[in-house]
Image (spheres, coloured by chain):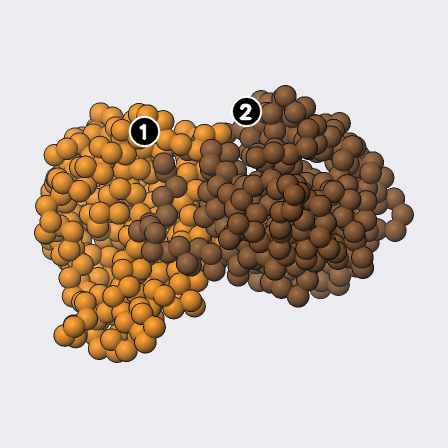
Chain colours: A brown, B orange
């Protein structure tokens, strides 16, 4: 196993870092955006221009033909720069379009070039996350699928062109594409909406795995930046006439944050390598999501605590990272959900082997 | 980046798996009996490894080393631990062996390295003292030069497995007037049967005898048993402790124990099946498997970034997390044993593991204390990596 980045990967990192830094300065010149944001069209077209929306997809669809590792590297920079964009969600949706049994001609290309906004809508109001057991149903009439149910997206869906969603049919959860869905009070109302069947549970797993890897990268960027802000603060901020770094209780806690960040870094990169080889490796995706969930909470909470009151303010970024880490924890299944999946599969293996 | 093992590394992994599965005598695998280490089991295992040239792969090639990559060392260690094989004695192969190979005289290398690799000499460590644990440099044991000999007086403590040892490598103060307490310290190699050496067992909370106090009363040590230069002992100790820390992420052992825990849970009946079906317990195991995976891939990431054989400061993560996870898994096993853990004697119808669970759990509270306590590791991280120096 080798975690060394090659020259192209390093170039990608610095290009995304430069772009994200430039976009964030514009986005935060004025009132600082803390909570969930609608999709910023300028940010979106920048992501598309840089090729990030097509990063893991084939060149025939306008993509870059890269792997999930590049996705982690890019999303980590977006996270560190506090660029609020539903990047992981868009990649998950696009992956399900890319590998669909049949998808509208040219849709993937339009997603990749940023002209069509397609996101996932997999959760349902009043139900815990469980995309494989949707209440939403689908029926086929005269060769056309119609989907009925209520769905939630991971991002504000006011401008969405289509959603990738799940509905129960064929005795399992299937994946559908619904164009121009009706959105009311934040809920997607599907009332016999015309849909295109993209595939079954394996397609769903593959899309979610890529989405989880992208989220893991973003969480990693948030954690790394929060740790850097915290250590800088401990070095410079004085209390009782001495720098905070004089107090061992604080430095020991910062060390634990570092441990969390580094475990998260190895895990995110490892999961990306594993998912690149086998997109339906749900166990590795679940382990990554659960680990990132725990470390994200730890680092986010400690970052605020070690800053003290300033960490509570909207104009100081450390809390933004914690806010975003909290959102990431609740996207595509939280730690409880993924540990539950893993717990049910415990008897399938004696040990977890990472060297294959 | 590369996820899969190369064809050569995969073949190497299979070779190691075959060796540790088929070539280690079975009596060596039960090396922890009734809470005590069986020294003969360690000798049998290390001899078998030595005969196959696998006891000291990280030493210089001329002294039996293999010139392996970090990944190959990791595979070697993990396959060994996963089969329950006792590892080569750390005091010999990770601690004093590399120090003698790096800083010892040619005569010392020829005299000590072969029997150290084969465990024909059993070494113990004489660093800690009653008032110098994590603050090692405060040590007070003295060595005064008298002709061709040093005369040693003082006391060491926490001397692990000293009751089986033939030799001790000890830090002693040779210059009490040195300007800093880290200076004026030397490293001496001392025979345990020298007149004036006495050993007193310290009984631990698991009921076992693993560590000792060692007293030196006018012990005469030939001057050619000084390692390197006089008053440079602190440098050698730092070198040695760096190696020690890297060795303490026993991923293979933790994996073995966690797999055992799953088997124990599957044997333990409940009204609804077995404990392995209990959702709370299963979630705890799933989380430990997840944390262990994160540690193992971090071990490999850190190993891949080490340079010139110098330990990466990030290796403190491995000590910190390795000891925590080891303790968490042993704690889990006590909880699986439940009522059967209340007696430390085997109970009819329950495996011996249940009787051993609590003593083992108690014994391994040591893991976050030895080798630089976890608080010391946090200080290494905060000072050395994050630059948080008060």
Across and down, in percent, residue A117 comes to: 75, 39
Q: Is residue A154 left or right of residue B174?
A: right
Residue positioned 17% across, 42% down in the render:
B21
Chain of the residue that carries numbered disc 2 in the rendered image:
A
Q: Is residue B347 visible?
A: yes
Q: Nearer the viewer, residue B384 or B168?
A: B384
Q: Is residue B191 visible?
A: no
Q: Is residue B26 left or right of residue A178?
A: left
Disc 1 target residue: B9
Please say if B335 is above or below A355: below
Please say if B142 is above or below B50: below
Please say if A324 is above or below A217: below
Residue positioned 60% across, 30% down in the render:
A56
Disc 2 target residue: A6
Helix, strand or loop at disc 2? loop
In terms of image quadrants, where is residue B103?
A: top left
């Amino acid at each position: 196993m080798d975690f060394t980045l090659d020259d192209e990967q390093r170039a990608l990192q610095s290009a995304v870092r430069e772009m994200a830094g430039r976009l964030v300065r514009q986005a935060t010149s004025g009132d600082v955006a803390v909570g969930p944001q609608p999709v910023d069209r300028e940010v979106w077209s920048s992501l598309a221009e840089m090729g990030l929306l097509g990063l893991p997809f084939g060149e025939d669809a306008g993509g870059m033909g890269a792997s999930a590792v590049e996705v982690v590297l890019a999303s980590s920079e977006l996270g560190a720069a506090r660029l609020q964009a539903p990047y992981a969600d868009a990649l998950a949706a696009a992956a399900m379009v890319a590998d669909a049994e049949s998808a509208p001609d040219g849709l993937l290309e339009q997603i990749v070039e940023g002209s069509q906004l397609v996101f996932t809508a997999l959760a349902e109001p009043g139900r815990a996350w469980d995309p494989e057991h949707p209440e939403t149903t689908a029926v086929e009439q005269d060769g056309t699928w119609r989907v009925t149910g209520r769905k939630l997206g991971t991002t504000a869906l006011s401008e969405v062109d289509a959603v990738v969603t799940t509905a129960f049919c064929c005795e399992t959860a299937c994946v559908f594409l619904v164009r121009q869905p009706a959105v009311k009070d934040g809920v997607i109302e599907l009332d016999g909406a015309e849909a295109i069947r993209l595939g079954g549970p394996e397609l769903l797993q593959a899309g979610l795995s890529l989405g989880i890897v992208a989220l893991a990268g973003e969480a990693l960027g948030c954690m790394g930046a929060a740790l850097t802000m915290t250590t800088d603060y401990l070095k410079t901020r004085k209390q009782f006439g001495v720098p905070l770094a004089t107090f061992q209780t604080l430095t020991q806690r910062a060390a634990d944050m570092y441990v969390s960040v580094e475990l998260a870094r190895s895990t995110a990169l490892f999961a990306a390598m594993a998912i690149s080889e086998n997109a339906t490796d749900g166990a590795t995706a679940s382990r990554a999501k659960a680990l990132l969930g725990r470390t994200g909470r730890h680092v986010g909470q400690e970052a605020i605590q070690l800053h003290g009151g300033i960490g509570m303010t909207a104009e100081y970024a450390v809390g933004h990272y914690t806010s975003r880490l909290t959102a990431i924890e609740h996207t595509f299944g939280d730690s409880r959900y993924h540990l539950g999946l893993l717990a049910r599969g415990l008897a399938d293996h004696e040990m977890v082997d990472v060297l294959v | 980046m590369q996820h899969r093992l190369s064809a050569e590394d995969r073949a190497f992994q299979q070779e190691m798996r075959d060796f540790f599965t088929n070539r280690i005598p079975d009596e060596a695998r039960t090396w922890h009996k009734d809470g005590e280490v069986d020294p003969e089991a360690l000798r049998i295992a290390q001899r078998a490894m030595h005969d196959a040239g696998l006891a000291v792969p990280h030493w210089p090639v001329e002294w039996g080393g293999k010139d392996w990559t970090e990944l190959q060392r990791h595979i070697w260690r993990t396959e060994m631990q996963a089969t329950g094989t006792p590892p080569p004695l750390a005091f010999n192969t990770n601690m004093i062996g590399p120090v003698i190979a790096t800083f010892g005289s040619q005569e010392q290398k020829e005299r000590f390295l072969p029997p150290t690799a084969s465990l024909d000499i059993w070494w113990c460590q004489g660093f800690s003292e009653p008032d110098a644990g994590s603050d090692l440099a405060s040590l007070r044991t003295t060595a005064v030069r008298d002709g061709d000999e040093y005369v040693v007086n003082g006391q060491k403590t926490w001397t692990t497995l000293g009751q089986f040892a033939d030799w001790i490598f000890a830090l002693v103060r040779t210059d009490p007037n040195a300007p800093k307490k880290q200076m004026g310290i030397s490293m001496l190699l001392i025979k345990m049967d020298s007149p004036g050496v006495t050993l007193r067992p310290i009984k631990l909370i698991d009921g076992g005898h693993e560590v000792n106090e060692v007293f030196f009363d006018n012990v005469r040590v030939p001057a050619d048993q000084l390692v390197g230069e006089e008053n440079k002992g602190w440098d050698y100790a730092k070198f040695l402790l760096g190696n020690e820390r890297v060795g303490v992420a026993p991923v293979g052992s933790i994996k073995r124990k966690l797999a055992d825990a799953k088997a124990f849970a599957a044997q333990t009946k409940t009204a609804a099946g077995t404990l392995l079906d209990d959702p709370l317990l299963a979630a705890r195991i799933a989380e430990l498997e997840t944390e262990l995976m994160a540690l193992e891939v971090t071990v490999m990431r850190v190993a891949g970034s080490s340079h010139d054989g110098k330990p990466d400061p990030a290796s403190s993560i491995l000590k910190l997390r390795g000891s925590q996870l080891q303790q968490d898994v042993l704690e889990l096993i006590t909880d699986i044993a439940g009522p059967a853990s209340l007696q430390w004697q085997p109970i009819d119808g329950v495996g011996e593991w249940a009787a051993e669970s609590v003593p083992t759990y108690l014994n391994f509270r040591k893991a976050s204390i030895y080798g630089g306590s976890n608080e010391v590791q946090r200080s290494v991280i905060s000072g050395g990596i994050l630059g948080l120096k008060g």
